[in-house]
Amino acid sequence: TELTGYETIKREVKYGEERSRIDLLLSRGDELCYVEVKNVTLGTDDGLVRFPDAVTSRGTKHLRELMSMVDQGHRAVLVFCVSRDDATHFEPAADIDPVYAKTLIQAKAHGVEVLAYRLRIDPPQLELTIPIPVQIESPSGI
């Protein structure tokens, strides 16, 4: 529901100073919303899910690009799609990639919106179902 009301949706649009490709570019008149989507599979027995599962310089680059879009007056949203039915809360995997985790903290403070949802996979459909609380300010391992 956080991303409804836009008139157009474009996929894989080149943008930013680092020439990234945004997963979704939403627009309504002159208003632009840049949406980056990440798949989350790493989890623990207590319902904690984490991203990334390996060092991701590309993911860090995407965060910098999203912050740049906020600086230009646009909306920027990072959506973590969690492919686990047992997920109850999300945090960055700072022990795996501390640079990504610190950049994610900066991005959120900078105005990048961060969402996490469980993803129901029923081929050929994918459906975002339950929102998952996001703990970014002080993840484990930082």
Image (cartoon, grey):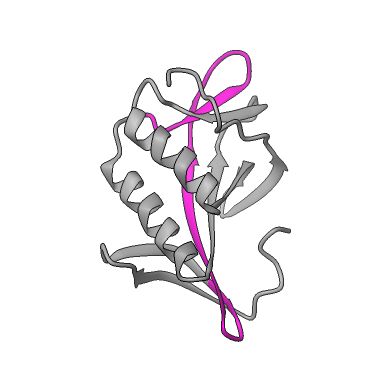
* Residue 6 vertical position relative to residue 93 in the rendered view, above or below: below
* Residue 108 vertical position relative to residue 50 in the rendered view, above or below: below
Could you tell me which residue is drawn at 40 percent across and 34 percent down?
102
Could you tell me which residue is drawn at 36 percent across and 53 percent down?
64
Position of the C terminus, as image quadrant, is top left
Q: Which residues are magenta?
A: 26-53
* Foreground of the two, 32 or 105: 105
Q: Is residue 101 left or right of residue 34?
A: left
Residue 133 position by quadrant: top right
* Foreground of the two, 121 or 21: 21
Q: How many marks?
A: 0
Q: Is residue 58 left or right of residue 53?
A: left
Position of the N terminus, as image quadrant, is bottom right
Residue 132 x %, y % = 67, 36
Residue 72 x %, y % = 45, 70
On whether residue 46 falls in the magenta region, the answer is yes
Residue 54 x %, y % = 32, 30
Residue 59 x %, y % = 35, 45
Could you tell me which residue is drawn at 51 percent across and 24 percent down?
139
